Amino acid sequence: MKKALILVPVSLFAFSCTQQQATTSVNQIQAKVEELSAKTSANEKRISAVEERVAKLEDRSAANEQQIYELKKELEEVKKTLSQITVSAQPSTGGVGQQEENPQPVVQYGAKDLYRQAFNAMEAGDLERAKELFEQLVKQYPDSDLADNALYWIGEIYYSHNDYETAANYFKQVIEKYPDGNKVPAAMLKLALCYKGMGDYEKAKETLRQVIENYPGTPEAGIAKVKLMELER
């Protein structure tokens, strides 16, 4: 009987110790879970920050690549234009009693020359003259390789004046009339920014996603990623 009485407190003590150990283990596990959760949250924030920095770097790189591309293209076009300007001289008619007249050169401007003049006017700040020359190019040479570029720059001129609706119309023409042209990615990107300027953020985001999906790896896609992140914040 005495042995039984002694065993009861011992058993109770052992059970109490086991319960305390179990409680301690649960608390330790909970503490580890909370620690891991905090670390995961911190890592997610770091990843998000890194992704944002990468996107900004891509934006800068894309802008630089676009500028270099445009400068190289314009240099090539100027070189070609200088060698392709067509000048025809009207022959002078001479005779007895008639004073010989100097021949008057007649310059026929081709698409490349019109483009060069328009671009020079735009760089000089004469946007109205540039727009007229670009429109003349599109009207006279709709099948030229420069027609889509001309439409694009007309859109840029209207965009610079915050006339987003008119600008969007020209960017759409680039995409619809010249779907295989080199200006389609840039026109689509600017179309998205026009929607943003008009307050249609859903269309803007949709168009930016199209740029990213249809033209991966391009400077325009890099810029589109950054602009999309800004709209989705």
Image (spheres, helix red, strand yellow):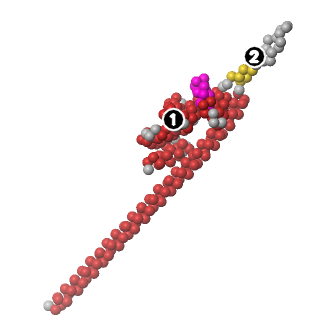
Which amino acid lies under the numbered mark 1 shown in the image of this protein? Asp
182 to 20, vertically: above or below: above
Label 2 and label 1: CA atoms lie apart by 45 Å
Q: Amino acid at mark 2?
A: Gln
Does dot 2 land on a helix, a strand or a loop? loop
Q: Which residue occupies 42% across, 41% down? A: 202
Return the residue at label 2.
90
Q: Is residue 110 above or below residue 218?
A: above
Q: Main secondary structure of the magenta part?
A: helix
The residue beneath circle 1 is 163
Query: Number of marks in the image?
Result: 2
* Image quarter of residue 104: top right
**Magenta segment:** 130-144
Q: Is residue 77 left or right of residue 174?
A: right
Numbered disc 1: secondary structure: loop
Residue 26 versus residue 76: which sits nearer the camera? 76
Residue at coordinates 47% horizontally, 48% vertically from top-left?
230
Report x, y in % for residue 1: 14, 91
For marks 2 and 1, give the one nearer the viewer.
1
